[in-house]
Image (cartoon, grey):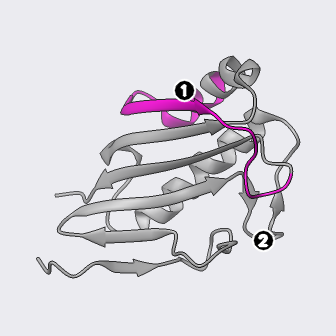
Amino acid sequence: MSSKVQTFTPPDVMAPIGPYSHIAKAKGFIAISATAGVDPATQKLVGDDVASQTTQIIKSFASMLASVNSDLAHVLHVNVFLTDMANFKAMNTAYAAAMGEHHPARTAIAVIALPKPGALVTMNLTAVERD
C-alpha cells in the first residue's frame, strides 16, 4: 500500500463549499469530511428537519465509501455536529435506521452554526477499506 495520501471528491456527492476534498485515503484508512444533508443533484438541503438531513448524510457516506472500496459496516468513528441538542433524539432515530446493525464509535457535539446555511446537522467519519 502506498503511504501517499489520496484526496478527491466523487462526482455524485455535494460539491465542497471550501478548499477541501470530501475523501482522504491512506494505507487503508479513509477520512470523510463533514457532510451536510444535501441532495447532490440539486446541491440543496433535502429538508428543513434533522431526520431527513441525517438520512441524506448517511446516504452520501455510503456513496463515498463505495467509491473507495468500503461501506458503512467498515466505519470506525462518526462525529456528529448539531446546531441544537434538542434534535439529538430525532437524529439518533434517523441515524440508527440508516446505519442498521453497525454501531461505530460516535461523538455528538453542539455547535453554534454550520457552514451550510440551513443545515441542522453535519457529520464526518473515519473508516477502513474492505478486505
- Where residue 105 appears, as percent x and y from the top left, is 35, 31
Which mark is on residue 41?
Answer: 2
Total count of labels: 2
Q: Position of residue 56 (x, y in %)?
A: 68, 49
Q: Amino acid at mark 1?
A: Ala
Q: Earlier in the sequence, mark 2 or mark 1?
A: 2
Check residue 96 in the rendering and tell me which mark sits there, or answer none: 1
Q: Is residue 125 left or right of 37 when viewed as pictured?
A: left
Name the amino acid type tagged 2: Ala
Task: Please say if 14 is above or below 35.
Answer: below
In the image, 84 versus 45, the foreground residue is 84
Q: How crowded is the residue under tag 1: few (<14 C-alpha within 10 Å), some, or many (20+)? A: some
User: What's the mark number on residue 55?
Assistant: none
Callout 2 touching callout 1 (CB < 8 Å): no
Rendered position, 1 above or below 49: below
Q: Which residue corresponds to the image point at 44% horizontal and 69% vertical from the top-left?
A: 23
| Left or right of 5, for residue 107 | right
Which residues fall within the magenta stretch?
Answer: 93-117
Cα separation between marks 2 and 1: 25 Å
Image quadrant assignment for residue 87? top right
Please, what secondary structure does the residue beneath circle 1 have?
A: helix
- Residue 69: quarter of image: bottom left
The image quadrant where one finds the N terminus is bottom left
**Residue 10 vs residue 56: left or right?**
left
Mark 2, secondary structure of its residue? loop
Q: Is residue 18 magenta?
A: no
Label 2, residues with CA under 10 Å away: few <14, some 14-19, many ≥20:
few
- Examine the rendered structure and indicate whether residue 122 appears above or below residue 70: above
User: Is residue 94 part of the magenta span, yes or no?
Assistant: yes
